Amino acid sequence: MTGTVTLRQRLKNKLRPSFYRWLDRRQPASAEVKLKQHLLFVFPTAYGGWLVILIGLLYLFGTNYQNNLILLCAYLLLSLLCFCILAAFFNLHQLSIKAGLAPYGYAGTEFMLPLRLSGTQHKKMLSWSGDDFVPLFYETLPEELQLELHPPRRGYYQLKRFTLQSCYPFGLIRCWTHIQLQQAYWVYPEPAPINLAVSETKAQQPDHPDQLAPYQPGSPASAIDWKRLAKNPWQPVIRQYSPAVAPHQPRHLVVNTTGAALEQQLSEFCALLHQFEQQGQSYSLNTTTAEIATDQGQAHLHRCLQALALC
């Protein structure tokens, strides 16, 4: 049994590259795929194969023994089989699948990749499977499909060819297709916990007060204007300063490590970029392949994270 499985696996591995090259010529990658006749494959399942054998035996017995009831039973089963072929084919026919914008996630965590569907009316019992995402099964299709991705590491990826199939309605006939979409997605480095807070420069208090206010009981003695008190001791006043905030200094990150230390540095930089953005600071980034000028905002943040993903 092990030898048979090994031989079958070797045969699959040998024929798979040629089969996928043929699929690339038949259905090249595109942003939207509409399932038509040349993209759909129809073949009996294991139960359907046994049904075909049963129909053949019934027809053979009916003709040999000239028994019309047996022939009628064979014809009825043959009609059922033909109905299942048409039902399985039209269950996928004219279904349109469209790629969306490139989503993003972080290494080591799952995230969702949306696909938009049209022509989903009366589409039943469809299963989706591929190397990039968790297999899905839908009794009725939604307008938007969410594929759950589990990226192994950071980088820029294209969604691999995946399989859409259905055995509707009775599990006797399998209709399937292999779809290649031009759908990309980003996987950013996993953010590392930051041990050291980003330091901020505190503004020094000015030498001259912003305003003077009458002395109130309980006010600190250090706030009293002693010069004015000497001139006018019956009307003491205190100095009041408005809180001054030092402007944020632009932050600059440089990727300067290799090997195992590189991944740790990328994770720390990923967390720092998010922290800078939350604090409203400007920042820039230099890597071995990109140099991003000082800026801020969500678009700038994603440009920096994409540069880290490609290091």
Image (cartoon, helix red, strand yellow):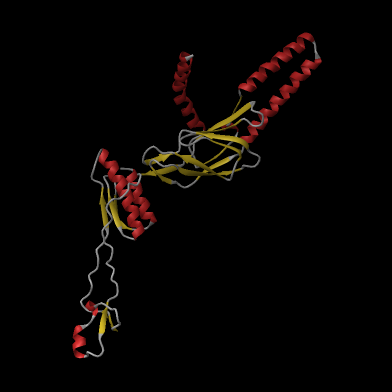
From the top left corner, tell me how far across and down residue 181 is, in percent: 49, 39
Percent x, y of residue 196: 27, 53
Looking at the image, which is closer to me, 74 or 135? 135
Percent across and percent down for residue 308 are 32, 46
- The residue located at (41%, 42%) in the rendering is 109
| Residue 4 higher or lower than 29, as above or below | above
Vertical side of 59 occupied by 19: above or below: below
- Left or right side of 241 for 177: right
Q: Is residue 189 above or below residue 39?
A: below
Residue 11 appears at what percent x and percent y? 46, 19
Tell me if residue 274 comes above or below residue 92 in the rendering. below
Between 309 and 139, the residue placed more toward the observer is 139
- State left or right for residue 220 relative to residue 154: left
Quarter of the image holding residue 46? top right
Residue at image location 70% in from the left, 17% down from the top: 55
Front in this rendered view, residue 257 or 119: 257
Q: The C terminus is located in which quarter?
A: top left
Query: Total label count?
Result: 0
* Horizontal side of residue 118 vs 105, given as left or right: right
Q: What is the residue that sits farthest to the front in this orientation?
A: 218
Image point (22%, 77%), residue name: 222
User: In the rendered image, which quarter is residue 80 located in?
Assistant: top right
